[in-house]
């Protein structure tokens, strides 16, 4: 692994006085953050976005530049009415790291790499917080203690999907900075072995709808 890659690591929610939309912020362990400039300085950033919580969105190396240029593309999916376009975010970087969202690829030195966008989102646009749709389907009628798999120890399986809908009934095709989703960091994970073998990936293929053979190593 390259010597310049230093992954972040700390335990528990960080309490550093920085406002993050009133939500707890946990270390994205094993990931390196590449900051993107979205404000003149930290004071301007805090003034604009301190009340917006942090979320994540998985991506791949072939899509990253397009998304940065055009914004996150809204699509049709779970939990919404027919014809409504939404963007899916998650408070959990581990959930977004699933290869269905964060495509695995190799660097020239043979190491494995994944990418996830770190964003701030206008809380007014979070229309729903719902259960995971891959990896494990929690039964809402059961208590969380009975969940067979815990995807991320820092978050409930029942609130891993944040559904982001614009204020015009889900008609927006792309969400850009001015639309309430600010991409301000690129999270990168570089590993010598396949990400499948990481302890945090234990849940990836426990869902029959996501068999491992659908996600071969690059």
Image: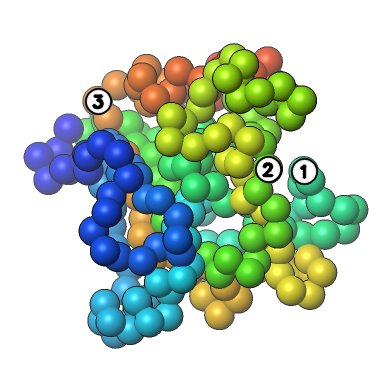
Residue drawn at 43 percent across, 23 percent down: 201
Q: Going by the image, does 212 lie left or right of 140?
A: left
Circle 3 residue: 192
Q: Going by the image, does 109 lie left or right of 75?
A: left
Circle 1: element type: loop
Circle 1 residue: 78
Residue drawn at 74 percent across, 74 percent down: 167
Question: Which quadrant does the C terminus fall into?
Answer: top left
Residue 170 in percent (x, y) is at 78, 66
Task: Find the distance from the CA under tag 1 to the CA under tag 2.
Answer: 10 Å
Q: In the displayed image of the protein, which residue is found farthest to the left?
A: 3
Q: Quadrant of residue 18?
A: bottom left
Q: In the rendered view, tell whether residue 64 sits above or below residue 48.
A: above
Tag 3–tag 2 contact (CB < 8 Å): no
Q: Earlier in the sequence, mark 3 or mark 2?
A: 2
Tag 1–tag 2 contact (CB < 8 Å): yes
Circle 3: element type: loop
The reply to whether residue 4 is in sight is yes
What count of labels does the image hold? 3
Task: Find the distance from the CA under tag 3 to the CA under tag 2.
Answer: 34 Å
Front of the two marks 3 and 2: 2
Residue drawn at 58 percent across, 66 percent down: 123
Circle 2 residue: 130
Tag 1–tag 3 contact (CB < 8 Å): no
Q: Going by the image, does 164 lie left or right of 17?
A: right
Q: Earlier in the sequence, mark 1 or mark 3?
A: 1
Which residue is more in the foreground, 148 or 8? 148
Q: Earlier in the sequence, mark 1 or mark 2?
A: 1
Front of the two marks 1 and 2: 2
Front of the two marks 1 and 3: 1
Circle 2: element type: strand
Residue 194 in percent (x, y) is at 36, 22
């Amino acid at each position: 692994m390259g010597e310049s890659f230093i992954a972040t690591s700390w335990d528990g929610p960080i309490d550093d006085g920085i406002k993050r939309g009133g939500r707890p912020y946990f270390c994205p362990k094993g990931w390196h953050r590449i900051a993107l400039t979205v404000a003149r300085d930290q004071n301007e950033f805090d003034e604009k976005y301190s009340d917006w919580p942090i979320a994540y969105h998985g991506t791949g190396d072939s899509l990253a530049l397009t998304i940065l240029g055009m914004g996150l593309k809204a699509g049709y999916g779970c939990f919404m009415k027919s014809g409504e376009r939404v963007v899916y975010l998650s408070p959990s970087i581990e959930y977004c790291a699933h290869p269905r969202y964060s495509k695995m690829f190799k660097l020239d030195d043979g190491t494995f790499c994944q990418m996830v966008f770190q964003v701030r989102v206008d809380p007014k646009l979070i229309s729903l917080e719902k259960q995971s749709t891959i990896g494990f389907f929690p039964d809402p009628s059961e208590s969380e203690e009975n969940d067979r798999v815990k995807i991320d120890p820092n978050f409930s399986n029942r609130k891993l999907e944040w559904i982001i809908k614009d204020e015009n009934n889900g008609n927006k095709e792309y969400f850009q900075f001015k639309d309430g989703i600010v991409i301000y960091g690129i999270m990168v994970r570089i590993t010598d072995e396949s990400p499948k073998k990481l302890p945090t990936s234990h849940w990836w293929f426990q869902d029959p709808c996501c068999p491992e053979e659908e996600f071969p190593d690059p």
